[in-house]
Image (cartoon, grey):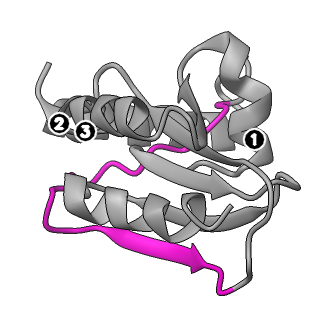
Amino acid sequence: MSVKRLGVLCALTIALAGCGVSEGPQPIATISPHIITLSEPLVEVESQAQVSGPITFMDFYAEWCTVCKQTTPLVQRLREEFKDDVIFVSYDVDAPASRDVVRQYRISGVPTFIILDGKQEVISRFSGGFGYADMKQKLERYARKN
């Protein structure tokens, strides 16, 4: 299935759910139908606060997401490099087990990455395709200060 068809299908499903036509469960996340490329990163939150305690790196992805498939090996490299400093968790936004956490963090597009401080508060949130160096720099900013 092409990305364009998948986007149209998602938009149609959301529109039908909004009209009350669908009797199934409401979607757990609205996935943006436009294609996010590695040149379109979006930083939504960036904290200047001093971080104490271990940080958590959250990776929200989908199996069908092309950009997610490109960033997965980068996240794996980060896991190896920061294994002693950072807690890594990944969530498939389409998995039933991820519904609560997807709602909690209001994930509306994939890939989305969230960094939590030791108190489990969001200190960085970014979406789209990021390169390894950019992701590493964000982690170093918080992880190595502990």
Residue 103 is labelled as 1
Q: In the rendered structure, which segment of residues is drawn in magenta?
A: 27-48
Is residue 105 one of those drawn in magenta?
A: no
Q: Report the amino acid beneath label 3.
A: Leu
Q: Which residue is mark 2?
A: 70
Mark 1 neighbour class, 10 Å CA radius: few under 14, some 14 to 19, many 20 or more: few
Q: Is residue 115 left or right of residue 117?
A: left
Residues marked 3 and 1 touching at CB (< 8 Å): no
Name the foreground residue: 77 vs 3. Answer: 77
The residue most toward the right is 119
Q: Nearer the viewer, mark 1 or mark 2?
A: 2
Q: Is residue 6 above or below residue 37?
A: above
Determine the secondary structure under disc 2.
helix
Counting from the top left corner in percent of width and height, residue 86 is at 59, 42
Q: Residue at 16%, 56% (x, y): give it.
A: 37
Quarter of the rendering containing residue 97: top right
> Within 10 Å of the Cα at label 3, are there few (<14), some (14-19), or many (20+) other Cα atoms?
some
Q: Which residue is nearer to you in this view: 17 or 145?
A: 145
Residue type pointed to by label 2: Gln
- Decide if residue 13 is on the left or right side of residue 32: right
Task: Say if 119 sits above or below 88 in the image.
Answer: below
Marks 3 and 1, the one that precedes in the sequence = 3
Return the mark for residue 74: 3
Is residue 118 among what the camera can see?
yes
Q: Are marks 1 and 2 in contact (CB under 8 Å)?
A: no
Q: CA distance from mark 2 to mark 3?
A: 8 Å
